[in-house]
Image (tube, rainbow, N blue to C red):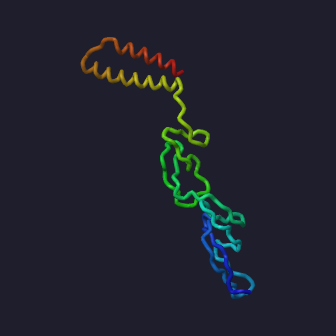
Amino acid sequence: MEKTKTVYTYDKYTKEYIGEQNANLCPVTQAEYLMPASSTEVKPSKHKDGFARVFVNGQWEYVEDKRGAAIYDCTTRVITGCTDALVYVVPEGYTLKVPKKDDVWLDNEWKPKPPPTVAELALIEIFRLEAQITNRRLREAILGTDNGWLTNQDALIEIERNKSK
């Protein structure tokens, strides 16, 4: 029996292939090799661009290597970081897919933002009218005037609220 044999080591956590190492013959039994931690006798598959070799369930598998890719928050569309380690699964609520300018996350993909509904448009109009009223009330409170404009605006807001229901 030879005194050493080649074994293949992998990362303890990611199981990614690291390289070759020698396992020494046991000096006591002279019948088995002392295997380094996180190593196997199974020879890894050949290198493939864009993939990492990972030891899973007693065999080597290719896993798409996404290191350096931006990770997007599906709610805010903001890049939360870049992958710096081998990533198997992107956490829930995040994606590696790149959004376009006004895309929103729907059905596990970026899609164009849908047009606002009638109710949403009514709410936008309510906010606009209320902002005008607030400004006008402040102005009239300072000047001490009231020409009935506010009563008319309150009626417009009520119309918009009815649309949003």
The residue depicted at 71 percent of the width and 88 percent of the height is 28
**Nearer to me, 26 or 83:** 83
**Nearer to me, 91 or 70:** 70
From the viewer's perspective, tell me whether residue 58 is left or right of residue 102.
right
- Image quadrant in which the C terminus is located: top right
Tell me where residue 29 sits by quadrant: bottom right
Measuring from the top left, give residue 164's x and y in whole percent.
52, 22
Farthest residue in the front direction? 49
Farthest residue in the left direction? 143
From the viewer's perspective, tell me whether residue 165 is left or right of residue 63.
left
Measuring from the top left, give residue 139's x and y in whole percent.
28, 21
Measuring from the top left, give residue 163's x and y in whole percent.
51, 19
From the viewer's perspective, tell me whether residue 29 is left or right of residue 21.
right
How many numbered callouts? 0
Tell me where residue 111 sits by quadrant: top right
Q: Is residue 20 above or below residue 151?
A: below
From the viewer's perspective, tell me whether residue 105 is left or right of residue 78.
right
The residue depicted at 24 percent of the width and 18 percent of the height is 143
**Nearer to me, 143 or 116:** 116
* Residue 128 visible (yes or no): yes
Measuring from the top left, give residue 105's x and y in whole percent.
56, 40
Q: Is residue 46 above or below residue 113?
A: below
* Residue 15 visible (yes or no): no
The residue depicted at 40 percent of the width and 24 percent of the height is 128
Q: Is residue 152 above or below residue 83?
A: above
- Image quadrant in which the N terminus is located: bottom right
